[in-house]
């Protein structure tokens, strides 16, 4: 078992990682200390529940919890809403959860974000545990305490910072993740390589075939490296006043594309892959990186089966730009964009010429077919 700490003074917590974590005695003793005599509710979505909910509830039963109950909601980003949160509150009330209880979010980013937000707000905040099951959740969404739900006009517009008690990362869950979801998580992995860690990119290039075959040892190492970068970023800048903004690489473009597709045609990771392609083009255009850096990003994204073009018609270019201004991270009327200034290094740039941004978007519209 590897432990990486998110260092936030009295709200510090560990990310515990192994490919057979639930059978590690060390994990049991760590959790027994946190859960002894407490009621616990495990919440999962309708895809993850039939696969793992019983196993996880039994596991927690063995960690000295007083009573372990569970709740299930219908899977999907479209259900990451205040309506689903309201139904979770009802489940919490029915199970008589109070502020001494603990909630566990077992699932992908939708589950972690929404259950985390329900935990942040129910009775003004109850402790929760993140137990990721999707690659997106392992490497990104389960770490850092950002919780929330979507509104019809945009993603993650309602939320709270609420750090978990622990992130329990058993990478064996990745065996059942659908192929498309797996590839989407890889978009975030490529993101860490491009903005922070050139040696991660070189390693990914070397082992990409084994990663695609889901060799568990390699997936575990990959999750460890990404967890390290996420934990370090959050530890230095919990509230996104500085360095945490770098994690938005590809996301300002990506969110706009995701919203234009009304959350359906592209999922988060695919939109981020396209967004990173636009951001890298813009970095080249501004003379900040050599085209070779952009090309290496493009090759690894393609090897991971990720799109590098939006598939939207070119006429939608201006709409994408407008949606970028609707993003909650826009300060005044200035877009803050994360761009690359070297392989494995990034910075936030303000006030980039709108014409150049528009060109970067236009260059990645369509599906690339003549
Ligand atoms: N809080 C943050 O910092 C943060 C960061 C990145 C992304 N996010 C959010 O995360 C969400 C995307 O996360 P996601 O891609 O995990 O979506 P998701 O939770 O919908 O999971 C993707 C799909 O995979 C299924 N699934 C998950 N684990 C499985 C497993 N082990 N076996 C079989 N099926 C499994 C789910 O049921 C779902 O159908 C978005 O809402 C995004 O906004 C949040
Ligand atoms: Zn993301």
Image: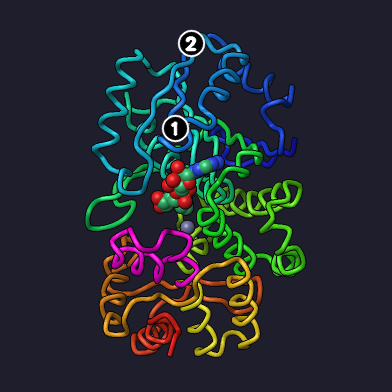
**Looking at the picture, how far across and down is residue 232, in whole percent?**
62, 51
Does mark 2's beta carbon lie closer than 8 Å to ligand 1? no
Q: Which callout, 1 or 2, points at the residue further toward the start of the chain? A: 1
Residue 368 position (above or below residue 329): below
For mark 1, does the 10 Å Cα neighbourhood hold few (<14), some (14 to 19), or many (20 or more) residues? many
Is 356 or 243 nearer to us in this picture?
A: 356
Report the side of 25 relative to 325 (left or right). right
Q: Which residue appears at 56% of the width and 32% of the height?
A: 10
**Looking at the picture, how far across and down is residue 17, in whole percent?**
68, 39
Per the image, the residue denoted by label 2 is: 67
**Looking at the picture, how far across and down is residue 359, in whole percent?**
39, 88
> Which disc number belongs to residue 44?
1
Does mark 1's beta carbon lie closer than 8 Å to ligand 1? no
Magenta stretch bounds: 251-274
Residue 190, picture quadrant: bottom right
From the image, which quarter does the C terminus lie in?
bottom left
Q: Which residue appears at 58% of the width and 33% of the height?
A: 166
């Amino acid at each position: 078992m590897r432990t990486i700490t998110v260092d936030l003074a009295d709200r510090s917590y560990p990310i515990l990682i192994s490919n057979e974590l639930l059978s590690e005695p060390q994990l049991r003793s760590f959790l027994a200390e946190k859960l002894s005599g407490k009621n616990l509710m495990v919440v999962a979505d309708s895809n993850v529940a039939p696969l793992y909910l019983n196993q996880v509830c039994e596991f927690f039963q063995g960690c000295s919890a007083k009573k372990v109950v569970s709740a299930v909601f219908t899977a999907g980003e479209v259900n990451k809403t205040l309506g689903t949160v309201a139904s979770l509150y009802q489940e919490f009330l029915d199970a008589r959860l109070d502020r001494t209880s603990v909630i566990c979010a077992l699932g992908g980013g939708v589950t972690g974000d929404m259950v985390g937000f329900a935990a942040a707000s129910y009775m003004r905040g109850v402790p929760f545990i993140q137990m990721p099951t999707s690659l997106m959740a392992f490497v990104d969404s389960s770490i850092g305490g950002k919780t929330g739900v979507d509104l019809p006009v945009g993603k993650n517009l309602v939320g709270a910072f609420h750090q978990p008690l622990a992130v329990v990362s058993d990478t064996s869950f990745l065996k059942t993740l659908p192929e498309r979801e797996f590839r989407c998580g890889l978009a975030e992995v490529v993101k860490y390589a491009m903005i922070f860690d050139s040696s991660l990119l070189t390693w990914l290039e070397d082992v990409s075939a084994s990663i695609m075959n889901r060799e568990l040892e390699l997936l575990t190492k990959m999750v460890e490296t990404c967890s390290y970068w996420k934990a370090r970023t959050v530890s230095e800048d919990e509230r996104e006043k500085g360095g945490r903004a770098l994690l938005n690489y590809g996301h300002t473009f990506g969110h706009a594309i995701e919203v234009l597709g009304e959350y359906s045609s592209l999922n988060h990771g695919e939109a981020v892959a396209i967004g990173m392609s636009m951001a890298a083009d813009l970095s080249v255009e501004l003379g900040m990186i050599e085209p070779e850096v952009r090309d290496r990003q493009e090759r690894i994204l393609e090897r991971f089966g990720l799109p590098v073009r939006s598939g939207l018609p070119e006429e939608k270019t201006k709409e994408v730009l407008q949606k970028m201004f609707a993003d909650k991270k826009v300060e005044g009327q200035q877009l803050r964009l994360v761009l690359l200034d070297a392989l494995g290094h990034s910075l936030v740039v303000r006030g980039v010429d709108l014409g150049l941004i528009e060109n970067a978007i236009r260059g990645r519209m369509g599906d690339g077919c003549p």
